[in-house]
Image: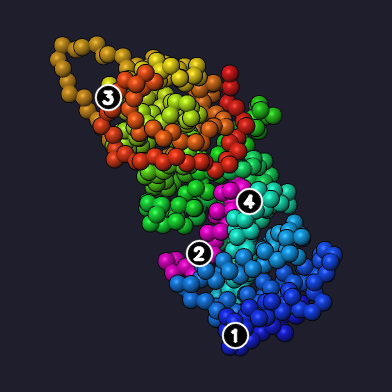
Amino acid sequence: MTNVELMREENITLDKFWDIANDLFYHEGSESEHRCSEDRINMLLVNYITLVCEHCEQLTTPDKEDQFYHEISDFVVNLDDYQLNLQFCIRKMLSLLTYGVDRNKFNLELEIDHLDSDVQDQINMSIMTNEKLIKIIGWILIVNYQSEKQKVLDILKEFHGFETLADVLSNYARISRNTHDKDPYVFNYSTYLELSFELCKNYEFDTSELAHISTQLLEYLFHSLKVAPKDDDILNFLKFKLLLVLNEQFMVAHFSYIAENPTHQMENRFFVKMTENSQHFQNFNEVLILNFNREEDPVIRILILKVFYLVFTTSNTCSNLYVNDLRLIIDIMIRELFNLSIVNEEALINTYLRVLYPMLLFSSIKDGRYKRESLYEVLKYLTAAEQTTETTRRLAERCLLLDFFVEPTPSPIALKPSFPQTLIRHDSSQSSIMSELESPDSPTPLPFDRTRSNSSSSSLDSKGVRRRKPPPPPPRRYNQRNGSELLLSRAKVGNK
């Protein structure tokens, strides 16, 4: 890296750091009426990142770390030379990430215990330097994304940024294996979790691109996921969001693949990893239900519903949820179907109905007919409301035709229904989606209006008649909000 030696300071202060940074970019003769050449911006960017890498530990403390990295990132992304060479700068940082990841992978594959102490120290120093490089670039990319969202995402998509970010996260999965509970690098990767989520939310990736999502990364995400509220652990929620959107990517890739190769199957590696370990399956479902009950973002709720759809339409998972969990899901669905605006949130309502159908048809909730009257009431309302579309009406009517709503034939001796608790099985290998549900009623990821209704908590129907609400879980208050620019998958499952 050019000129690195000239910038080293033993006892640098923050003021001295900024003096060096300004001298680097604004020294005499650096400004020109013409666009800065790629060779020059390459040298400036590498020298600046190296300067930060050399002195970041001296210049910040844990309580001010985020502020420091945001400031050093904001400084460089707002430079005219950076903006004029935006595409080149992002490509350069992607190549530096690839270099750092490759060096770490090489170092981690060495049998370090068989090396002498000096070599071990060199290897550990190399890993620490690469981790600092990864952290700094992650901050620059996320700050750049926050100011120029679509432009940055487009460049990342065009120049294989998704694959590079996946490799960076896989690097962390390898690093974290040896850190146990004292992980010094855990917060280096929150920026990459967020950027990967945004890329997956806005683009479809093919099977070759998704191949960069390593098995080791999926195992790490499932293994490290905790049952914790979003506000208590933002990093944990970022992992959860990434798992949700990876499921969406694998689902879309699956449908695209079988459309081109009707006689072949492609596995959903998210679903395989979730179900092959009973502890992962149970833990992830607890996180799903926790966020299903609290999350207001319609994008996240649709992604959660798509996981539930897979669970309820796969033979070896639909029976592996605890009855109490199933009841809670029903309570939440009743609340949401009463609260959502028929006009503004039709796609979200339809997704709930598409998941409700296999749940009532296949899961053990059908045996006890839990909340049958409340479900019947909300479904009848959706079929009768003036503003209900034909699709919503058809989906609601389809649910009403299930045996769940048919009065049982009275027996001579009335027996109290039992609700046996279904335990998790250990042979949870993946099964294919049941062909009965590969129909117009599967959860098609259609675009939707994400503007929430101001009267979403009202229980009035379209004629102003108040409807009785069932007892729900503790309700959320809905505010008017705009969703993110999720480009929901254009793949239609048996659309009609």
The residue at which mark 3 appears reads as 468
Q: Which residues are magenta?
A: 179-200
For residue 12, which numbered disc appears in the image? 1
Q: Are marks 3 and 1 in contact (CB under 8 Å)?
A: no
The residue at which mark 4 appears reads as 149
Q: Residues within 10 Å of mark 2 (few under 14, many from 20)?
A: few
Residue 345: x percent and y percent?
A: 47, 30
Of helix, strand and loop, which one carries label 4?
A: helix
Q: Given the current orientation, which residue lies at the most extreme left position? A: 413
The earlier-in-sequence mark between 2 and 4 is: 4
Of helix, strand and loop, which one carries label 1?
A: loop
The earlier-in-sequence mark between 1 and 4 is: 1
Residue 156: in magenta span: no
The residue at which mark 2 appears reads as 187
CA distance for labels 2 and 1: 25 Å
CA distance for labels 3 and 1: 68 Å
Please tell me whether the stretch drawn in magenta is mainly helix, strand or loop.
Answer: helix
The earlier-in-sequence mark between 4 and 3 is: 4
The earlier-in-sequence mark between 3 and 2 is: 2
Point out the frontmost of discs 2 and 4: 4
Residue type for callout 3: Arg
When the figure is inspected, residue 439 is found, relative to residue 74, above or below; the finding is: above
Q: Is residue 14 left or right of residue 402?
A: right
CA distance for labels 2 and 4: 22 Å
Of helix, strand and loop, which one carries label 2?
A: helix
The answer to whether one can see residue 297 in this image is yes
Quarter occupied by the C terminus: top right
Q: Residues within 10 Å of mark 4 (few under 14, many from 20)?
A: few
Q: Are marks 2 and 4 in contact (CB under 8 Å)?
A: no
Residue 198: in magenta span: yes
Q: Nearer the viewer, residue 71 or 455?
A: 455
Residue type for callout 1: Ile
